[in-house]
Image (cartoon, rainbow, N blue to C red):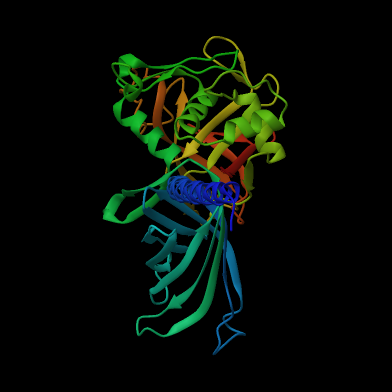
Amino acid sequence: MPSKTSGLHKRSERGHMKSLIKLQLAVATILLSAASFSSAATASSLDGEWQGMFQCAPSPTDPAKVPAYNTSFNLSVSGVEAIGSRVAPRVAEVLKGVVDADGKLKLSGSGQLKSGEGKPWTTTISGSFIADSFSGKGGIFYSKGNQARDCTVSLSHVGVAQSTVKDADGGSLEVIPKYLELARELVATVKPENNHYEYHANERFDVHWKDEGYKENAVDTGCGGLVSAVFEKAGSPLIKIIRTKQRRPLKSKPYVLGIHGWLQAAKSEVGLTRIKSLNDVEVGDLFIYECKPDICTLAEGIAAEGHITIVDSKPVKHIFLLSKGLEWDVTVIDSAGGPHGLDDTRYVGRGIRGHSGVGRGTYRIMSDQDGVPTGYLVGRVVKDVAARPITFSRPQY
């Protein structure tokens, strides 16, 4: 016959088991909640810039004529919307898609050679985001639905600067970086009374944004400060990365680079990739020139190290039969002491001093037959690269 002590012991065990089951249920609930939170956090963290490679196998029917192909690929994610494009000088292609709740994405869109040659095609890529990477497979299809080749895309999350789609001239779709969108906003909205070129020797910029509590957008900075301002406003890590690698102090944000820092980054390709030929320059690239000692002087009488601008449209090539080289019109956005020509937004009129500060203008750049810059024109005077070396650079972030 069981004793009272053993009965109490069994009741104690049953009570312990019930408590343990309740504890396990509570832990399971917490884990499920954490998983849901983690999933939501992962979805929101997809926003920003993704970069990597777009690779295609050779054509299965004619591999000699259509060999394997690879090029850079950029993807911008904002919420559930995604927009991607190949970084290829000869190709015009925009792929769009929607990210679903499981982190899956199907991109599709049409493409064609910028020259207009050949037939258009359709590209589709399907894949998934896992942490800070995206991997997808698909292909290129021609009008009858025949797959021309198999393709893959592999991307990494590189920054938070977002690209957007704008209506360009003629209503075509244009994918532009967020920093360029912000530069265009300043050109369109800053009034002359709020627009001034100002050289700051202590690496700072005064660019005020209406959406940050100021009455109006305003610019009171030099060329390096303006470019820094739009990259920082776009959320790009570029300035911080350059300052860190150049061992410059990281003071409180927003970070800024003066023209000296930009010139050094362009030379060493820190955060920037050099573009050797004007044939390969794209919208959003940086046009920078350096001034050798005692060559350039600001209106204040201060020696200038150089100038930096953002390319606002694809360079337009001019071929002259009697010339050994080429000439290019390169439209840029910058902060300058005055207009670059009659078509500049800072131009007021003949014989009247133009506005300074942010604006859009055009440089006439000279090159050899391969598109390598040899100088640029100021009026009818050629400023040669021996005294003013020219660099075109593509931001990596």
Residue 65, given in percent of the width and then of the height, sits at 58, 83
Q: Quadrant of residue 178?
A: top left
Q: Quadrant of residue 60?
A: bottom right
Residue 291, given in percent of the width and then of the height, sits at 65, 27
Residue 34, given in percent of the width and then of the height, sits at 48, 46
Decide which of 334, 43 is in the foreground and name it.
Answer: 43
Quadrant in which the N terminus is drawn? bottom right
- Left or right: 74, with 369 as reference point: left
Asked if one can make out residue 313 in the rendered structure from this viewpoint, the answer is: no
Measured along the vertical axis of the image, is residue 327 above or below residue 243?
below
Q: Residue furthest left?
A: 171
Decide which of 117, 249 is in the foreground and name it.
Answer: 249
The structure residue drawn at horizontal position 59% and vertical position 46%, both measured from the top left corner, is 5
Quadrant in which the C terminus is drawn? top right
Measured along the vertical axis of the image, is residue 91 above or below residue 164?
below
Q: Residue furthest bottom?
A: 61
Residue 319, given in percent of the width and then of the height, sits at 49, 55
The structure residue drawn at horizontal position 52% and vertical position 49%, both measured from the top left corner, is 11
